Image (cartoon, helix red, strand yellow):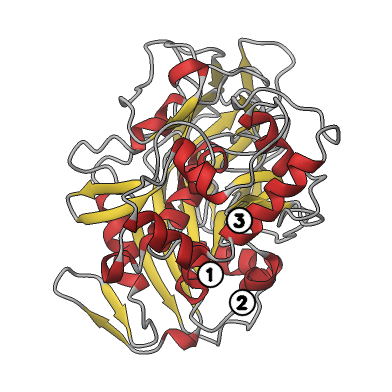
Amino acid sequence: MRTLSRTSRWVLRGGTTAFAAASLAAGLAYGGAVANAASHPASTSAESPSAITARMYSTADPYSPAYKHPYRYGFVPTLSRLRQMRTWAINHPNVHALSASDLSYGGGIDGIGVTDGPEKVYLVFYGSQWGTQSTNSQGDITLSGDPSGMAPYLQQMFKGLGTGNELWSGVMTQYCQGVATGTETCPSSNQYHVGYPTGGALAGVWVDESAPSPSAATPFQLGTEAVNAAAHFGNTTAASNRDAQYDIISPTGTDPDTYLQQGFCAWHDWNGDSYVGVTSPYGDIAFTNMPYVTDAGASCGENFVNSGSAGLLDGVSIVNGHEYAETITDQNPAGGWTNTASGEETGDLCAWNAGPGAPAANLSLTTGTFAMQSTWANDGAGGGDCEFSHAIVTNGSSQGNTVTVNNPGNQSTKRRTNVSLQMTATDSQSGQTFTWSATSLPPGLSINSSSGLISGKTTSRTGTYTVTVTATDTTGAQGSTSFSWTIHT
């Protein structure tokens, strides 16, 4: 959910079960003014809802899960914590400078602002507590230590996103990179819009039972598990992780980052955040801290949309969908799209229907029906709104900057030989710096992401490799070149 300084957490509210039951009995929708009136204290000021929301999610609000924990980007507050945040914000109208609700582009970090290719979601079930594996009739992994059935539910959800022309994913495609810092709209010619997950977003599933999951995993441990997952899936280059995110799902009975005490349901971040502090040899790694949220019951969304047994997993898809949407629009927080006044991301502005516009609802996919929240659209009604569907925005016919990577020519190197090859590039905009990545380098070689120097020592393995080197400037514009590299005796 929203980013304060880095992490996104979902906050829960006390008394949610009673509230949900009463609202359903009364036939109320969980959106817009109804949800606000039912779940939040009234403001006696003439302030706009967006001004109060911005203060709620600011670093000044002591009830925010990101207060003194800035890595919790896009956190989803529990419903009880959300009420405390709002009460404080109403009672402190002069604490924080405010701005409009719309999101603006943060300029990218390491050349990464949004997920601009087809999304790749890797589900990582963290710890031996998940138990024995089986496979159900739908081809999903099931686990004996998963009493709520979160594992197959999430697999079906991510398999279904991007199928059947669903338009919930379309909301995020309006955002892009390759624009100036502070930009609030993407021109039609932009080439780097958030990708649409055509054919499904799920890229892989790993049950890591090599050791028990910690009872209260730290951000460092969660980030380390994400880097381990990249290695497990063979994503060992920056390019292979460019559009990937790793969903680190802790087992029941654990309390990752003490979410049960801290009043949130999940957050997302990346390994390079100083609060995470994990080194990755595989490029930047985006990940989500996804607790076993059914342990928190209604606080994390159980029965938020559907009543009875049909709604027991509502919070699972609402919370994980929230973090997914925020990761693809702010992959390396906060280099993507956030609200500059409060740090909120696209999911935060519509969390638990605390904003205007579309309420949470059931999303019908080819793989089933899943409770989901709406997300913020800068181009929504009135200049910005929470939307549940949006036309898919595709890339334009031209781009901003032009990056040209100079081809060094085909290479031939003896095995067990030291290598030093400096890659260079030019940019149509002067003063640009590059982030470098390479795919299919011969074993033993790597590229420095800052300098573009390919170095290392070739191994005893011979063969010919087709190498692709990519340079990305600070606006997100990219250029690539390919050449062969033969390792011989």
Q: Amino acid at mark 1?
A: Pro
Q: Nearer the viewer, residue 19 or 375?
A: 19
Q: Is residue 471 left or right of residue 442?
A: right
Q: Amino acid at mark 3?
A: Pro
Per the model, the C-alpha gap separating discs 3 and 2 is: 15 Å
Q: Residue at x 70, y 20 (%)?
A: 432
Secondary element under disc 3, as helix, strand or loop, is loop
Residue pointed to by mark 2? 255
Judge whether 454 appears above or below 221 on screen: above
Question: Do tag 3 and tag 2 residues touch (Cβ < 8 Å)?
Answer: no
Q: Residue at x 81, y 53 (%)?
A: 62
Residue 296: where, in percent of width, then height? 52, 72
Residue 61: where, in percent of width, then height? 79, 48
Residue 5: where, in percent of width, then height? 74, 45
Looking at the image, tell me whether mark 3 or mark 2 is earlier in sequence order.
Answer: 3
Question: Do tag 2 and tag 1 residues touch (Cβ < 8 Å)?
Answer: yes
Per the model, the C-alpha gap separating discs 2 and 1 is: 7 Å
Q: Nearer the viewer, residue 225 or 384?
A: 384
Residue 28: where, in percent of width, then height? 36, 47
Q: Quadrant of residue 344?
A: top right
Per the model, the C-alpha gap separating discs 3 and 1 is: 13 Å
Residue extending farthest to the right is 95
